[in-house]
Image: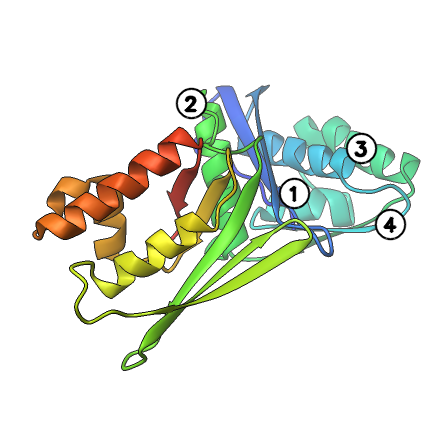
Amino acid sequence: MPGEALDSGQLGVGGWGLVLLRPGELPARYQGQLDAPDNNAAELRAVLEAVRLAPEGEGLNVFTDNQAVIALLSRGRGPALLAEQAREVLDEAQARGQRLRVAYVPRTRRHMLSAHDLANDARRGQVAPGLSGPHAEVLIEQRAGSPEARVTLRRARERVTAHVPFDPLSELPPSVHALLAAVQLAQPHETLRVRRASKVAQALWLKPERALRPGAQSQVTQARAEADALGILVEFQG
């Protein structure tokens, strides 16, 4: 599901970003910088890159919140300034044997937000952390009253689920204990994109010295040091 964005409609340097979804694979993120006359040109570039990255001879669904891009690619209507760029997208899709479909989704969708962030970072000359290296998606689930958390880690062609029991005698808050369990599942030089980590877990991972209890501070500090030594990065995604 590609998405694309530019943070500013001013003339000058722009950025594009997209999230490409393939069946059975983790979301792949891409970004780049370009000289763009306006926001629509940057978004068309994101579509072009999606076409180039997607498999040949298959259908390609492009989702965007930009109505001008939809009109240009679906109905051939839009600013004359962008007609040549739109034709390039359509010609590339035809040459690759792709059945291109462009549809609207709101910016509030998770992958759309990610694509917009990638584009904005690219415009500023910033490369998103962990963009090109190995990564895994992590989901932490905690139910009120449950004696355990469930940690699910998903990487290419692999899915790992861990049930993490809470120890009432531990100085670690349960949510932090679940996060450390997720980090233990990581492979060397892997980036973990963690969803649903509690605010407490995020705060203590970023600054272990915030822990009120010495035992908790020590455990998080040690876990951070071990992760750093293995090249493991942790990104929190809400």
Marks 3 and 1 in Cβ contact (< 8 Å): no
Across and down, in percent, residue 228 comes to 37, 32
* Residue drawn 61% across the image and 48% down it: 27
Q: Is residue 56 left or right of residue 233?
A: right
Q: Is residue 16 left or right of residue 62?
A: left
Which quadrant of the figure has residue 32?
top right
Across and down, in percent, residue 238 comes to 37, 54
Q: Tell me the distance, in whole angstroms, between the alpha carbons under discs 2 and 1.
A: 23 Å
Across and down, in percent, residue 195 comes to 41, 56
The earlier-in-sequence mark between 2 and 3 is: 3
Residue behind mark 3: 87
Residue behind mark 2: 124
Which quadrant of the figure has residue 81?
top right
Q: Secondary structure at mark 2?
A: loop
For label 4, count other residues whose C-alpha is less than 10 Å away and answer few (under 14), some (14-19) or many (20+): few
What's under tag 3, amino acid-wise?
Arg
The earlier-in-sequence mark between 4 and 1 is: 4
Q: Give the foreground label among 4 and 1.
A: 4
Q: Nearer the viewer, residue 93 or 77?
A: 93
For label 2, count other residues whose C-alpha is less than 10 Å away and answer few (under 14), some (14-19) or many (20+): few
Residue behind mark 1: 69
